[in-house]
Amino acid sequence: MLRPDEVAERGRQKQDENLRFRTYLKTHADSVILDAQFKTLHEELFAQYDCSTCRNCCKMFSGLIPEDEIERNASFLGISREEFIDKYLGNEKNEGGYVTKNCPCNFLDESSGKCILEDHKPEECVKYPYTDQPDRMGSLFSIIESAEVCPVVYEILERLKEEYPFGARGMKKVYPNEPCPCGSGKKYKNCCGRK
């Protein structure tokens, strides 16, 4: 797996290839099977990865605190709602809540790599990079963008490319009478391998 300081450059180098892979998936993959593949890889790779050694997501994005979580977060930090908003959040409220004042996220303790909100961090942060969520087919652009931020997302895309007969470089050979890797249940020659 890539080091956190390598992923931005490598993700940019792979961006055109990843966009072609996105197009390939849109026309060849079954969305239910793709969701299952993403979820499996997400669980496998995040079980082995310590996000606190990276925190690129916290360093490159501002946080979003939903309105209904402000009171709970303020209480956890031992301050009032007003102090919490004044100290950590921007003045403008958007549809999802308040955006943190700074990027990197105000709640990142860079010395430890941990969120000062601990178990109270926003759901958006807990779920990032969303690779285990449903409808990955509909959010492939954001996944490609995340491949420049998160080493695990980068690895997920690279592993998925090995599962599909996409491109020639590094892809396993699929023979005509084998099941199609797209998961259709058809033979490769009658599906993605059709000429």
Image (tube, grey):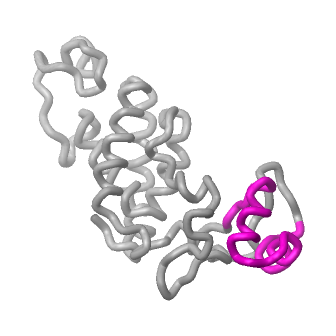
Q: Work out whether 97 lies above or below 38.
A: below
Which of the 4 image quarters holds residue 70?
bottom right
Magenta range: 63-91
Q: Work out whether 95 lies above or below 177.
A: below
Number of callouts in the render?
A: 0
Q: Quadrant of the N terminus?
A: bottom left
**Left or right of 60, for residue 111:** left
**Left or right of 112, for residue 162:** left
| Extreme-bottom residue of the structure | 111
Measuring from the top left, give residue 147's x and y in whole percent.
Answer: 44, 57
Identify the residue at image location x=18%, y=48%: 170
Say which of 132 and 146 sits in front. Answer: 132
Identify the residue at image location x=24%, y=33%: 165
Measuring from the top left, give residue 95's x and y in whole percent.
Answer: 82, 49
Which of the 4 image quarters holds residue 184?
top left
Measuring from the top left, give residue 108's x and y in whole percent.
Answer: 59, 77
Identify the residue at image location x=80%, y=56%: 67
SS assignment for the magenta stretch, majority:
helix
Which of the 4 image quarters holds residue 59?
bottom right
Identify the residue at image location x=76%, y=70%: 74
State yes or no: residue 89 in magenta. yes
Q: Quadrant of the C terminus?
A: top left
State yes or no: residue 140 in magenta. no
Measuring from the top left, give residue 140's x and y in whole percent.
Answer: 50, 41
Say which of 131 and 180 sits in front. Answer: 131
